[in-house]
Image (tube, rainbow, N blue to C red):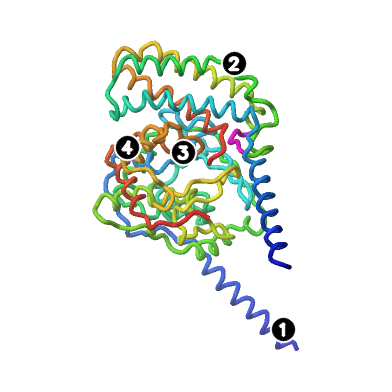
Amino acid sequence: MRRVLAGLVAGVAVLAAGGFALTAPPAPDPALVLPQGDAAAGALVFAAAGCAACHSAPGSDAAEPPVLAGGTAFATAFGTFYAPNISTHPDAGIGGWTGAEVLHAIRAGVSPGRSYYYPVFPSHAYALMTDGDAADLLAYLRTLPADATPSRPHDVSFPFSIRRSLAVWRWLNGPPRWTGPDGPGPEVLRGRYLAEALGHCAECHTPRGALGHLDRDRWMAGAPAPSGDGRVPNLTPAALAWSQEEVTRYLESGFTPEFDVAGGEMVAVIANLAKLPEADRAALAAYLAALPPVKSD
Amino acid sequence: MSRPLLTAAVVTGLIATAAIAGSHAETNPTVKARQSHMQLNSFNLGKLGAMAQGEAEYDAEIAAAAAANLAALAALDQTAYWEPGTDAGTIEGTRALAVIWENPEGFAKLQADLAAATAAMAAVAGDGLEAVQGQMGAVGGVCGACHREFRVRQ
């Protein structure tokens, strides 16, 4: 009996050690050498990635320059998350982090203290960001004002409160990867980069499974609004009847072809997209038109 | 069940379904009033927008009339449209969020902003295409600010 017990204890210990090793967040790649970043170009990456919409203090996402004090609340089925301070403040923000730490946080979703961020932060999208854009974004972030507001801890229930449980979510969601088509033509490819790597459109426009992973078989086919009211529209050609020109215009002005005006989260998204070159909005429209049609539920 | 009886049952069922569907389609009059108001807004905004976006040729008279309509609409007293208990959480057929009644000051502020933006548009809409294009963003911005906070997603 004692031997069985000892074996059992040893077995559990091995499993726990294995689980601990398997769920360990990765370290930054020491071999990564980034090109010199350009802050002006980084401002456009910042806009395309929609950083200010979440990381500005509530209700101040239109401020210029953006003050990334954090504090906006995201109520979800797993708990309430609060966007952290990512201003250049050395203690409250990310001013004290190395460039490699900032980019590992953005693209791998791992903090300098080596713990996973909750996927309310779309690092699985940002993982697809090019080194050039990442370097530019970093250069831009370094120019922004410091704010001393401390980040508010998330209010998340067990077992989601254990950050290592996020390894399971990561496994379910799969590795960062492209989902929409890579053509025809470079315009669709650029649109895919803007939509899937920077814009993280799918976070709201794609439905999720029970544990919050994206249902890639129904990519961009619409989903219940994360805010709890209404639905986020299906953007695949099965539902979106607007011409590419109409989509391009909407992404700049917020005016639909019927001259309704965008609301909800799209107000901030459109304010950001309006800062990009016209060709980028047209690329997004081309990407949407090239998506496989998926009927709404 | 015999065939006539079955037919009668099916027909009765259909009538009942139609009656239920009909009662749902019957929109609350206050909801109908504000949706009609929004319809007039988008119709007039569409006249200006088509010119601003180069879809239609600029016509000073049409532009001035559309802008005057928008300003007149925004100046209407709408108190009776926004009757408490007519939000999307309480009744069907509306996208008005309950926060309209929870944050009346914020809602009133945006109504005043719209009155100001449309009055500014009306003051210049007859002066040329560039004047219309210059004011479109301000008008659309107020529309969006209100839809952002006070309207159900879709």
Q: Which residues are magenta?
A: B93-97
Q: Are marks 1 and 4 in contact (CB under 8 Å)?
A: no
Within-10-Å neighbours for mark 1: few <14, some 14–19, many 20+: few
What residue does disc 2 label?
B77
What residue does disc 1 label?
A5
Please tell me which residue lies in front, A205 or A161.
A205
Please determine if labels 1 and 4 lie on a single subunit: yes
Q: Is residue A145 above or below residue A167?
A: above
Location of residue A33 in the rendering, given as x and y in whole percent from the top left corner: 30, 54
Residues at marks 1 and 4, CA–CA distance in whole angstroms: 64 Å
Residue plotted at (34% across, 28% down): B50
Location of residue A187 in the rendering, given as x and y in whole percent from the top left corner: 26, 49
* Image-based side of A118 in relation to B140, left or right: right
Q: How many marks?
A: 4
Residues at marks 3 and 4, CA–CA distance in whole angstroms: 15 Å
Residue kind at label 3, given as amino acid type: Met
* Local secondary structure at mark 4: loop
Please determine if labels 3 and 2 lie on a single subunit: no
Q: Is residue B94 magenta?
A: yes
Residue A276 image label = 4
Mark 4 or 2: the one toward you = 2
Q: Are marks 3 and 4 in contact (CB under 8 Å)?
A: no
Would you identify the image quadrant in which residue A32 lies?
A: bottom left
Residues at marks 3 and 1, CA–CA distance in whole angstroms: 59 Å
